Amino acid sequence: MQTPNPYRFPPPLTNPQAPVGKKRRSRAAAAGVGALAAVALAAAATGAVVLFRGDGERPPAAPADPSKPLIAGWKTVVNPKHGTAFDVPPDWEVLAPTVFSGHVDDVDPDKVLIGHTAPAFYKSRWCSIDGDGDGQVTDVRLANTGTKGAVGAKDAAEVAEKTAPTWVYAAYTQPDKSVVKWDKPKEYTTRTGVKGSYVTARSEGAARPNRCAGDGRAVVFGFKNSRGDLVAWDFYGRTGVPGAVGDALIMRIMSTVRLAGEPEDPAPGP
């Protein structure tokens, strides 16, 4: 069941901060990436609750080396800060664990609405736009995924339910919360036995102030790392456009989420 009531839009769990320049940015604009210093303003999917089992086989045990992909030929994204890992297809761009990717408030560019670290991008030059009309062209990504902390949540379901709508709002619908819809949390277990809950959120009728803007969706899987901290795997991307990431691929990527050793930093933030 969807939850369309804009007056009950869940606030984000935290307001992650990263250095953001004073220059106003449009929703389609994107900053460069760097060691927890970049905000990538760019633009995953709905799906039934399934335990991905490949071709009917039992889920494999976690690899001795979590940096090695569970799916042959794919790339592994490791986030040492949170002690997590997951895999993406070979045509995705995997950035360094220190890279922060997120979205700022369109009205107050110094305010970070949401973000994650150790991101992976799909089609990082999917659409280019001069969002401010100042002659500076910015590349907008078709999809983005990563991992973030979830300080303040009471359980995995709350992590997912508060985070997924926030990604959609921040990336696609600002300042309109009324077009953001989301589903109830669903329990999920990954291939390596990580248990948690996920929520799918989407926009329906987002404004299109430029050719790169439009509707999008997000999937957030909340779970605990090896230290018992709640964390979130995030995935969001544009919808209704050629090449948009499909449901089956989103679920397959999410199925590879796994623990990757002892987390490095217990501090709040992405």
Image (tube, rainbow, N blue to C red):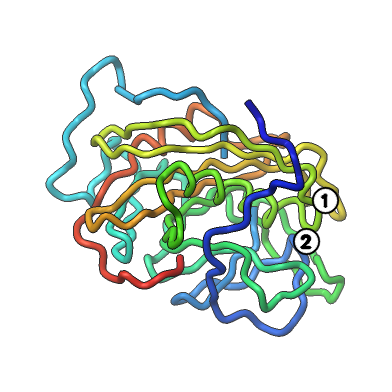
Quadrant that contains the C terminus: bottom left
Residue at far top of view: 56
Q: Tell me the distance, in whole angstroms, between the alpha carbons under discs 2 and 1.
A: 8 Å
Where is residue 17? Give x, y as percent.
54, 75
Label 1, secondary structure: give it: loop
Quadrant that contains the N terminus: top right
Badges 2 and 1: C-beta atoms under 8 Å apart?
yes
Q: If you read the primary sequence from the N terminus, does the residue marked by circle 2 or circle 1 appear first? A: 2
Label 2, secondary structure: give it: strand
| Residue at 46% across, 45% down | 91
| Residue at 72% across, 43% down | 180
Residue 110 falls left or right of residue 37? right
Residue 236 falls left or right of residue 24? left
Of residue 245 and residue 108, the one placed in the foreground of this image is 108
- Kind of residue sitting beneath label 1: Arg
Q: Where does label 1 land, which residue?
A: 211
Q: Residues within 10 Å of mark 1 (few under 14, many from 20)?
A: few
Q: Is residue 84 above or below residue 22?
A: above
Where is residue 222? Give x, y as percent.
42, 46
Q: Is residue 197 above or below residue 127?
A: above
Q: Where does label 2 land, which residue?
A: 129
